[in-house]
Amino acid sequence: MLMNTAETAEVVSLATRALRYIRRESLAAGLLGYSTSRLDTENLGTDNSCNTLVTLSVPIYETLPYVVVLLLPASGFRLFEPFRKSSLSAVQEIRGNNVEKLEEGDHAPSFPRTIQRGLLFQLTELLAVYVLLHKVTSVLFIPGSLSVATSCSSFVPQVLALGAMAGYVGLFVVLYYFARYRNHIMMQIGAFQESDHARNFKRYAAVDSSDKLGSTNTSKKAMAVVRTRLFHATSRGDLDEMREVLEYAKRAGLPNGFPRKYYAAPKIRLKFFAKSCRNPVHVAAYHGNIRALELLEENGFDLAALDKFGRVRFSTGSFFWYFFRFLVKRPSNSDDDKSVSIFHSTLVTPLHCAVATGQLETVRWLLERGVAPGELAQASFRSRRVPPLFLAEHADIARELLLHGADPL
């Protein structure tokens, strides 16, 4: 949900005030940082409490210039743009190349415009986490600072301590609105979850050139090539390459039933960890590519196999929210918990994938071939162990599942 006009004006106003604060504090940080580094401890008298007070205040001033960097994403300069969308022309070109290869009745897969965060913005996120951790650990020294402040008789250290305290509170304010601004931009571009802008668009267009369909010495190496090439070919909806890869698998000596052996459901180890098999059936169901599903079925793939389809992508955004969730409340519609629980695994069926993406015809196709509508996902946490019906957002899909015996309870 996007912010309304009043909320947007409030964010802009707050950002403007934050900019003024940053300019003032940065200048003060430079002058006071230089002054504190040049302080002659002999002028503070023999009272060690004054020296201690200055020592505790200096690190706060040293982190104030970081605020300028945190404000760069809101500066409006293209270089510091937080997020960017993949070009529409690139998506249309890839889709057009695949449509040309389709035969009559083939289904053209969908390729959404993806969102990526800029490199400099990723560095800014890491800096924000560093500043937050720095300020949190500084809390441990506040009681000691208050005790020595009362015993220090010199005026200069006391002024430095008061300025450091104001800067300490101000940094938390800046961090809070940095996170709010980040949320605001995400909502505007439609990236409601961290996983919505952690993907690389190039994965649709290219495959590692080292994975050639040449001769291999062992079936293990051949299977590695098949797994990679078939996964990417299915992602692009390239039926010709899928057929070529499957023919190569036969020439390489892989047994007739290799899909059920090599694409068997992975095991969740130590409750949290599982390795994805990169099953092409899940990819085809996700995109609603029925022709690809038919081709995979003809070659012995299990239409009800479990796999870890949503692999963990540990991005700077996930790292950012892992810490900032304690400071800022997340928007109600960004319910992606990958940033909160990085170490977890969920194994789903192709039917889960088709239901989650609203592929009605694919759901019908799978159900007509006997895929169980009530198969539970396997997951690290009980809340994730749900049947496909719990992922349905379209009435027609929910009705189709219920007609085939899905349990609504």
Image (cartoon, grey):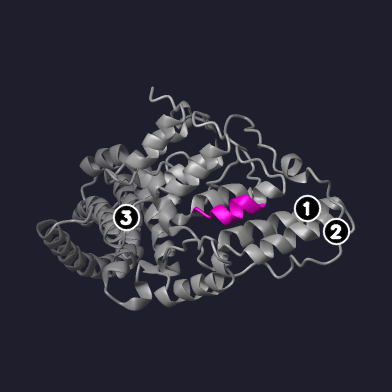
Question: Which quadrant would residue 277 be assigned to in this image?
Answer: top right
Q: For the view shown, which residue lies furthest in the right direction?
A: 217
Residue carrying label 3: 60
Q: What is the span of residues highlighted in magenta in the rendered image? A: 288-295
Whole-number angstrom distance, CA of label 3 to CA of label 2: 67 Å
Residue carrying label 2: 251
Q: Earlier in the sequence, mark 1 or mark 2?
A: 1
Tell me if residue 16 comes above or below residue 326 in the rendering: below
**Residue lying at 64% horizontally and 67% vertically, measured from the top left:** 207
What kind of residue is marked 3?
A: Ile
Q: Position of residue 44 (x, y in %)?
A: 28, 55
Residue 251 horizontal side relative to residue 238, left or right:
right
**Residue lying at 72% horizontally and 40% vertically, measured from the top left:** 260
Towards the viewer: 45 or 222: 222
**Residue lying at 58% horizontally and 56% vertically, measured from the top left:** 291
Circle 1 crowding by C-alpha within 10 Å: few under 14, some 14–19, many from 20 = some
Report the mark closest to the observer, 1 or 3: 1
**Residue lying at 33% horizontally and 46% vertically, measured from the top left:** 334
